[in-house]
Image: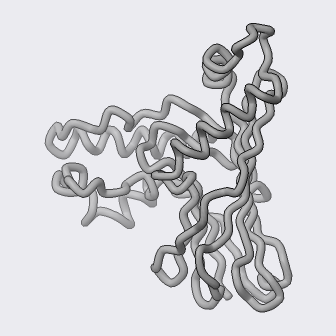
Amino acid sequence: MTFDRARAISFLFLVTVFIGSVPAPASAHPHIFVDAQFEAVAGADGTLSEVHDRWRFDEVFSSSVLIDFDKNQNDTLDPSELEAVAKTVRTSMAKYNYYTNITINGKAVALTKPDIIRASYENQALILSFSQKPAAPTSLKGLTVFGVYDPTLYTALDFASDNDIKTSGPGFASCKRKVVRPGSKEILAENQAMLTTLFFNDPTGTDYSQLVATRLEVRC
């Protein structure tokens, strides 16, 4: 996780205390850290074909997965055990859209479930990779925003470099792209009206995690 992203998350937590001692959600502090990679693929017809995610989990969380799923206790995860991990993730993360969020001109794009999630255990780290496709034909006209983040802030997904969140395919050839990494000053300046007691006390579960998430903006 980069210093600026960590500072931004801490900033939001402090704001919740400052604006009236509003209890922050229990998950407002990240417990799991992920080095993430993301790729959006567009076809020659200018539609979104699919998106790819690859997550490398921190060693502490990975070790807890090893303890839970290493049934034969050989200190690694065998193919059958990795399959069990992947199956569990595919089921449990569906309600969070697999942390993958896309909007086109402000409208959310629905994605299908991954057909399969691939899991590996390398150098004491759990690695998951999967692909998703739009649930309906999706034309890339206007502003498309790609974000990969946990809405509960329990998991912090970090892109080490701008090249780790990218586009490919002929449909993106004439598009302009920009990676946005919000800092605490930007968040405060752009969202003063939202950062209120009502915002943090919203019973509908206002998704303030998106304010600190790295995002890819593509204009076609």
Tell me: 195 left or right of 53: left
Percent position of residue 198, x then y: 17, 56
Height in image: 203 above or below 41? Answer: above
Percent position of residue 15, x then y: 29, 44
Residue, far left: 20
Quadrant hosting residue 59? top right
What is the tally of numbered marks visible in this picture?
0
Percent position of residue 213, x then y: 53, 54
Percent position of residue 2, x then y: 63, 41
The reply to whether residue 103 is in sight is yes
Height in image: 174 above or below 96? Answer: below
Position of the C terminus, as image quadrant, is bottom right
- At 67% from the left and 57% from the top, the residue drawn is 114
Colour theme: one colour
- At 66% from the left and 20% from the top, the residue drawn is 69
- At 54% from the left and 80% from the top, the residue drawn is 104
Position of the N terminus, as image quadrant, is top right
- At 70% from the left and 43% from the top, the residue drawn is 55
Tell me: 87 left or right of 16: right
Residue, far top: 73
Question: Observer-nearest residue: 121 or 156?
Answer: 121
